[in-house]
Amino acid sequence: MKGAKHVFTQEVCFSPFVIVARALREIRYYQSEAMDGRSLLSKLAFSRVVKEIAAKGVFGVEYRWENDALVALQMATEHIMVMMFELTCDTLPFKSR
């Protein structure tokens, strides 16, 4: 087989230290100034979901949403999501009980 390349596949096994280090690096990034003014969720996707939920919930009536209202709702939603993730991480040590 002339010119054939051998591809060796090897399972990648990460140690717990590597996983924790990567998670801490991501946490530092998301808490840094690089994320100031940015949101975790896409604004367009979030506004679509909000408008869809509002249309389904109120007899199919289409409402107009102000940009400031969507931003405030998105910030509150992201804050609640982060709180839920923190509570989940706080309860992990108790999972074996």
Image (cartoon, rainbow, N blue to C red):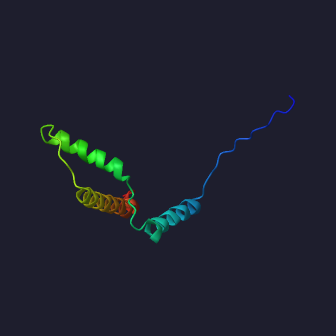
* The residue positioned farthest toward the left in the image shown: 59
Give the x, y percent position of residue 12: 64, 49
Tell me: residue 52, above or below residue 73.
Answer: above
- Residue 31 found in image quarter: bottom left
Tell me: residue 20, above or below residue 45.
Answer: below
Please tell me which residue lies in front, 3 or 97: 3
* The residue positioned farthest toward the right in the image shown: 2
Give the x, y percent position of residue 76: 27, 61
Residue at 16% x, 42% y is 57
Q: Is residue 14 left or right of residue 97?
A: right
Give the x, y percent position of residue 35: 44, 65
Residue at 23% x, 58% y is 69
Q: Is residue 71 left or right of residue 13?
A: left
Please tell me which residue lies in front, 66 or 74: 66
Number of numbered discs on residues:
0
Q: Is residue 68 left or right of residue 92?
A: left
Please tell me which residue lies in front, 52 or 63: 63
The N terminus sits in image quarter: top right
Please tell me which residue lies in front, 66 or 85: 66
The C terminus sits in image quarter: bottom left
- Residue 15 found in image quarter: bottom right
Give the x, y percent position of residue 3: 85, 33
* The residue positioned farthest toward the bottom in the image shown: 33
Tell me: residue 4, above or below residue 50.
Answer: above
* The residue positioned farthest toward the top in the image shown: 1
Residue at 62% x, 51% y is 13
